[in-house]
Amino acid sequence: MSKYDEDNDYEDPEESTVSELENINSTLGEILSTLNSRGTDFFVVVFGFFFVMSLQAWPGSKLDRWTDRVWYSYRYDTDFKNVNVNKRPLDCDFFHAPVGSKGCEYEKRTNVFGNEQREALIKQATTPEEQQSYAKQPNSVAVYWEKEQD
């Protein structure tokens, strides 16, 4: 006779079996909820790690280059097709071979051709043809990466 049966005197053996199964079921439910909460914590940690790694890889990614094109075309009043965004070199990345700190990083720089630059070129032009050709040039933006040592 189990300790549980000694504490609960049941007249019917079926009632005892049902009670024992309910006790087992509640214990298993507690174990499962504990495992699920630990699994959720693990999932949050793993998800957080991959989220941080994706942010580290954001500069120079295809999505970053696309958003840069949208931003610079809006900011400098130019067509989307006149914004050129270069891909960021990977040789300073921590995970690029050999893995580890490289002592350098890349900073985003821009070269803008807008109204101010156009006016300066028109003033420097020596012939009317040059002035007309400079006046017809569209606004443009070139985004490039400059390597800086730490």
Image (tube, rainbow, N blue to C red):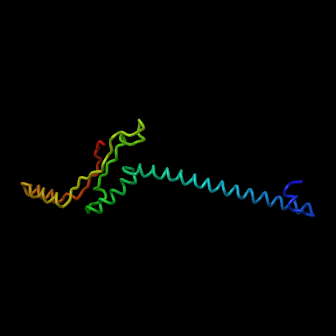
Counting from the top left corner in percent of width and height, residue 79 is at 28, 60
Q: Quadrant of the N terminus?
A: bottom right
Describe residue 84's horizontal placement relative to residue 13 as left or right. Answer: left
Counting from the top left corner in percent of width and height, residue 12 is at: 92, 63
Q: Residue at x 66, y 56 (%)?
A: 34
In this orientation, which residue lies closer to the viewer: 45 or 120? 45
* Image quarter of residue 70: bottom left
Q: Residue furthest right?
A: 11
| Quarter-of-image position of residue 44 | bottom right
List x then y, in percent, for residue 40: 59, 55
Q: Is residue 58 left or right of residue 150?
A: right
Foreground residue, 130 or 3? 3
**Observer-nearest of 110 and 70:** 110
The residue closer to the viewer here, 6 or 104, is: 6
- In the picture, residue 29 is in which quadrant? bottom right
> Could you tell me residue 149's position as x and y percent?
29, 42
Residue in the picture at 30% in, 63% down: 74
> Which corner quadrant holds the C terminus?
top left
- Left or right, 146 with respect to 34, comes to left
Residue situated furthest top in the rendering: 98
Q: Is residue 65 left or right of residue 16?
A: left
Q: Is residue 42 above or below residue 94?
A: below
- Identity of the residue furthest to the left in this view: 126
Instruction: Name the residue located 18 percent from the left edge and 59 percent from the top edge.
Output: 136
Image mark count: 0
Q: Residue at x 91, y 60 (%)?
A: 13
